[in-house]
Image (cartoon, rainbow, N blue to C red):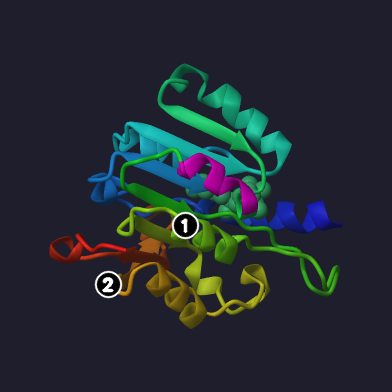
Amino acid sequence: MFRLACYSFLFFHIIHASMGPSGFYPFNSNRVFVETGTYRGGGVKQAIEAGFEEIHSFENWKKFHIIARKLFKRHRKQVFLHYGDSATQLWPVIQKIDRPITFWLDAHNATDPGTDPHAKNSPLMQELEQIQMHPIKDHIILIDDIDLCGGYMFDYVTLDQIKQKILQINPKYTFFFLDGGELGRFKNSILVAQVPRDQNRCSF
Ligand SMILES: C[S@@+](CC[C@H](N)C(=O)[O-])C[C@H]1O[C@@H](n2cnc3c(N)ncnc32)[C@H](O)[C@@H]1O
């Protein structure tokens, strides 16, 4: 039943999941891209198109991890695919990266609380905690499907709680929204958190 719920959610999100019409180009001033939730590789493909030098993607569903490995075989010097739970596995990878990162946080499940009231759908807050451990404090953070926050797919975590968590990383973060999905059909579905350029240099 759990997998069935996930499949129906993911089928819907095959469109919803992708970045808007301009892809990740506006965020490629950072040369490293880190995605959570590889799924069928749509985000990785767009990151390659945007010209990132080093791309990491995390997936905890083996089937999708294996599919992505085949898909991006030719890009093994650029694309690094990690099989594991991004709630705990992000830090061991990002701690070795000493450049600013563009994060695309897009890992979700969609288990209906009616099916399993204890199911965990979103690793987002743990991902942000791991990003907070990183010494660089001005990473670009993009969070997909933000229009669904406050509901069960975000484990009832609200937009305000997400913003507060990001401001704990650096109080200079500012926020805006972008349309997601192909042709930008999902209005304001991506939260962008950025530290304005002239305020980038802060010491912690
Ligand atoms: C919405 S899809 C990602 C779509 C992809 N990022 C894109 O842009 O095309 C969500 C994916 O996150 C995965 N996922 C869910 N929870 C996860 C977790 N804790 N760690 C890693 N992957 C997770 C799911 O298995 C699913 O493949």
For badge 2, the amino acid type reads Lys
> Which of the numbered marks, if any, corresponds to residue 172?
2
Q: Residue 170: image x %, image y %? A: 34, 69
> Magenta stretch: dominant SS?
helix
Task: Please name the residue shown 50% across and 30% down the image.
Answer: 80
* Dot 2: element: loop
Instruction: Check residue 87 for magenta coloring.
Output: no
* Element type at mark 1: loop
Mark 2–mark 1 CB contact (< 8 Å): no
Viewport quadrant of the N terminus: bottom right
Tell me residue 19's x, y (percent): 40, 52
Where residue 133 is drawn, which disc sits there? 1
Badge count:
2
- The quadrant in which residue 68 appears is top right
Question: Which residues lie in the magenta part?
Answer: 88-95
Image spot of residue 24 (x, y percent): 32, 47
Residue visible at 59% across and 22% down?
70
Q: Residue furthest front?
A: 204
- Specify whether 24 is left or right of 114: left
Other-residue count near label 2 (Cα within 10 Å), few / some / many at <14 / 14–19 / ≥20? some
Say above or below: 52 vs 105. Answer: above
